[in-house]
Image (spheres, helix red, strand yellow):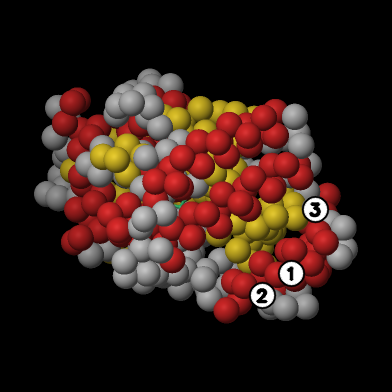
Amino acid sequence: MKTTGIARAHTNIALIKYWGKKDKALFLPMNSSLSLTLEAFYTDTKITLDKTLEKDEFYLNNVLQQEAEIQKISKFLDLFRIPAKETRFARIESYNFVPTAAGLASSASAFAALAGAMHQAMGWDLSRSELSTYARRGSGSSTRSLFGGFVEWNQGTNSEDSMAIPIDDASWDIGMLIVVVNGAAKKISSRVGMEQTVATSPFYPAWVESAKTDLEEIKIAIQEKNFTRMGEIAEFNGMKMHATMLASQPPFCYFEPDSLIAQQQVVYLREVLGIPAYYTMDAGPNIKVLCKASDLDKVRDHFEQYFASEKLITSHPGEAMRTLTEEEWQE
Ligand code: ADP
Ligand code: DP6
Ligand code: CO
């Protein structure tokens, strides 16, 4: 007997970052975070539970993955299978419409899509926030990709209440330009980078403290639709996260020379051209420029002076995770 589930989830970019776990096994974070889901980048995943399979199989972009990757997925699917006494193995087929492991949040869309597909395959009926606690255990940032728009991952106190909460659907004048400085896979994964930071950076306690204040303040800015205030807090928060890495032992840094050029151009946009724009960066060299959707064309045009057109991707806010029909999957 075969049972399937198919889901699409979009990536999200944190404006208040998640950087550090207090419980590595359960993916409980040191601080709450808040993100914007992006329309432009997503993952589609299909799961087929099949009695005839003798082990899990995982194809990413039509390529059968290595054992270590399959083990990660098997462990994740077991979170659903074990409590339900489901003994079938699965074939997982996934397509990333986002560069994989490049600091563009592929792990976020990946595990949110996997959670959505598995939830459907199992015939469960969890709320989105409950399902986000499952996604979380694949990759922390994927907690937030269950919802669209602005989403908080409330750190909670335990595995059941560390979950995503929708904050605002971002159906106002919000956009993002992604500057792909380098689309190749990074050398230090988010997981390893944050672990090293928590263990060695003397700046880390200050990060945790100030992320709390940033989160409270950005929630007010979002509620008031105060774009400037939101951007200022996001830019400040992102750079503080990177500062913790510079102070790690050994120090490490995701910036590349072009990352700095892009940052300078964001400052130029707002200070010289009067276009409100703010930058943030994740565990990779790419720059995400938070701007108004109505300014996206102007912001993109400006960046074309410095970056090749195919390195510039504009996005509006994205939707929540959703299941796909077999017809939508085949398209
Ligand atoms: P990113 O910045 O892209 O989120 P991470 O280091 O956090 O980078 O995560 C990348 C990892 O996420 C990959 O090495 C892989 O293990 C996992 N991943 C990415 N895409 C998928 C997918 N579609 N299905 C399952 N796992 C995926
Ligand atoms: C810098 O969610 O990729 O993008 O939980 O270990 O899988 P794991 O890490 P991941 O870390 C994301 C870090 C970040 C900030 C953020 O998205 O909040
Ligand atoms: Co990631």
At which x and y percent is residue 139? 35, 46
Determine which residue is flagged by label 2. 261
Picture residue at 62% right of the left edge, 48% below the top = 234
Please state if 284 lies on the left or on the right of 231 as rendered: left
Residue 265 image label: 1
Q: Position of residue 238 (x, y in %)?
A: 55, 53
Residue sitting at x 76%, y 37%? 226
Q: Position of residue 150 (x, y in %)?
A: 60, 36
Q: For disc 3, does the CB lie below 8 Å from ligand 2?
A: no
Marks 2 and 3 sit apart, C-alpha to C-alpha, by 18 Å
Mark 3 crowdedness (10 Å alpha carbons): few <14, some 14-19, many ≥20: some
Does residue 262 sit above or below 242 in this rendering?
below
Which residue is drawn at the image coordinates 49% and 60% (left, top)? 242
Contact (Cβ within 8 Å) of mark 2 with mark 3: no
Q: Give, as a three-letter code, the residue at label 1.
A: Gln
Label 1: few (<14), some (14–19) or many (≥20) C-alpha neighbours in 10 Å = some
Pick out the residue farthest to the right: 273
Label 2 crowding class (10 Å Cα cut-off): few <14, some 14-19, many 20+?
some
Residue 70, picture quadrant: bottom left
Secondary structure beneath disc 1? helix
The kind of residue on which mark 3 rests is Pro
Query: Circle 3 sits in a helix, a strand or a loop, which is it?
Result: loop
Whole-Å distance between the Cαs marked 1 and 3? 12 Å
Q: Residue 117, which numbered label?
A: none
Q: Position of residue 307 (x, y in %)?
A: 69, 77
Amino acid type at circle 2 is Ile
**Residue 83 sits in which quadrant?**
top left
Residue under label 3: 276
Residue closest to the eye, 17 or 313: 17
